[in-house]
Amino acid sequence: MARKKNRMSQEVNAGSMADIAFLLLIFFLVTTTIASDKGITNILPPKQDPNVPPPDIKKNERNIFKILINSNDQLLVEDDFRDNTEGLDQDIKAFVLNFGNPNQENVDLYNSLPPSLKGISAKDPESSDHPNEAVVSIKTNRGTSYELYLEVLDLVKKAYFEIYAERVGLTADEYRALSSRDAAEKELMQRGKEDIPMAISIAEPDKTGGE
């Protein structure tokens, strides 16, 4: 009869390994930088009541600066084809500050502008009446690249921020760096954009191009 061998069971003490794993977890939690992309900071209009018909807003065509970007990333600006976005921000500034048909309130606004901004105004009767009427419209296709769309949107905002900054004697970068939490800086921000609203219309992309 075979004798049973009295073998001792072998166990590995994993307690120390658990401690090491816990320390590594704490180390990575402390040292890892988690990216927090803010995306595009746009204030969207409130959702409309489906039972209420949308307001009928009549806008003269000359008060709309039209930018179309097709699915091949080609630009059509004010019905003119463009190879690139060069000078687009300056064209938008000239459109916003055109003062082609101002009322008395906007004559006063024009007179309050610094000479550098008055010099941009062409007072063309075929272009925008005044900054309160001017709207920049951006329309894309489904196949339009995000890179070009964002570049165009940034140039439109750049044009407005340059106007606001020049009104208060700052550069565009200095104006954009102002904080609304500081009372003095908040007053500068409000004075810069007073009576010149940033009116950007972004239409829903049509179904041309893309997947």
Image (spheres, helix red, strand yellow):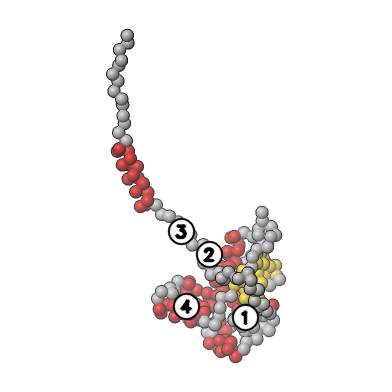
Q: Let me know if residue 189 appears in the view.
A: yes
- 155 left or right, relative to 38: right
Q: Position of residue 12 (x, y in %)?
A: 31, 31
Q: Position of residue 119 (x, y in %)?
A: 58, 83
Q: Let me know if residue 122 appears in the view.
A: no
Task: Sort mark 4 into few (<14), some (14-19) or many (20+) by Cα contacts within 10 Å.
Answer: many
Q: Position of residue 158 (x, y in %)?
A: 54, 71
- Mark 1 and mark 3 in contact (Cβ < 8 Å)? no
Q: Earlier in the sequence, mark 2 or mark 1?
A: 2
Location of mark 1 (residue): 133
- In whole angstroms, how far apart are the C-alphas of marks 3 and 4? 26 Å
Q: What type is the residue that disc 3 sits on?
A: Ser
Location of mark 4 (residue): 189
- 150 left or right, relative to 173: right
Number of the front mark, 4 or 2: 2
At x 37% / y 49%, what residue is drawn?
A: 28
Q: Which mark is residue 40?
A: 2
Q: Quadrant of residue 129?
A: bottom right
Location of mark 3 (residue): 36
Q: Point out the image quarter for the N terminus.
A: top left
Q: What type is the residue that disc 1 sits on?
A: Glu
Q: Quadrant of residue 107?
A: bottom right
Q: Nearer the viewer, residue 50 or 55?
A: 50
Task: Sort mark 3 into few (<14), some (14-19) or many (20+) by Cα contacts within 10 Å.
Answer: few
- In whole angstroms, how far apart are the C-alphas of marks 3 and 2? 13 Å
Q: Nearer the viewer, residue 10 or 68?
A: 10
SS under mark 4: helix
- In whole angstroms, how far apart are the C-alphas of marks 4 and 2? 20 Å
